[in-house]
Amino acid sequence: MTTWKEFAQAAPRIAEIFLRRHAATGNLCMLGTLRSDGFPRISPVEPRIFEGQLAVVGMPDTTKFNDLARDPRFCLHTATVDTHVKDGDAQALRHSHQPAGHRAAPTIRAQQLYDDTGFDLRGREFDQFYVADITVGSAVEVGDGHLDVTIWKPGEAERVVRKH
């Protein structure tokens, strides 16, 4: 499993773009999952870095978490609001899993979410706590007359593909 901490060390350029875009949109990302009928679903989420891992968080008891419980594959993409992508964007293909001891984590996470945003899920019981096993990462940056696509896979260094 590749944690966020390991990913950020192996792919610092992609991680920096992800964190920059994540912060710029108020932590908003788009989560792609597979519905039970096999069609894709896109849902807004506010992922968090929690204890060195990327946690997929959101409102409990939603269809996106039912999707992840059934099929752990997903794609997470930073929210893009600029069609010229001046600030770049990033995405990662991942598998999710519920970590051992995850039942205690939502309580801590709910307090952190409340402290960070004022959104109050404290005291609610929910089992849906997923962390990412990062399997592929990429980022796009627009330069002076070119597009740089940075790609990372486990066991490899980041590589940049320049498109003119």
Image (cartoon, rainbow, N blue to C red):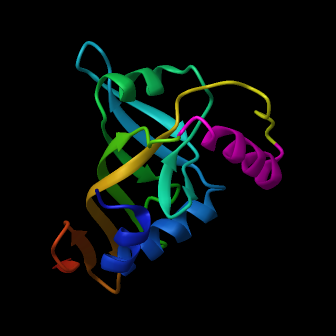
What residue occupies the far bottom of the structure in this picture? 144
* 41 displayed left or right of 160: right
156 and 101: which one is in front? 101
Residue 84 in sight = no
* Residues in magenta, as a range: 102-118
Q: Dividing the picture into quarters, in which one does residue 71 lie? A: top left
Which residue is rendered at x = 16% and y = 72% of the image?
155
Which residue is rendered at x = 38% and y = 62% of the image?
90
28 and 53: which one is in front? 53
80 and 65: which one is in front? 65
Q: Position of residue 147 (x, y in %)?
A: 27, 75
Number of marks: 0
Q: Position of residue 160 (x, y in %)?
A: 21, 80
Query: Where is the N terminus found, in terms of image quarters?
Result: bottom left
Residue 104 in sight = yes
Q: Position of residue 31 (x, y in %)?
A: 43, 40
Does 112 lie within the magenta span? yes
Main SS of the magenta segment? helix
Which residue is rendered at x = 61% and y = 43% of the image?
105
Q: Is residue 150 above or below residue 52?
A: below
Q: Is residue 41 above or below residue 23?
A: above
Does 103 lie within the magenta span? yes
What residue occupies the far front of the structure in this picture? 101
Query: Where is the C terminus found, in terms of image quarters?
Result: bottom left
* 31 displayed left or right of 71: right
Q: Position of residue 116 (x, y in %)?
A: 77, 55
Q: Dividing the picture into quarters, in which one does residue 123 lie? A: top right
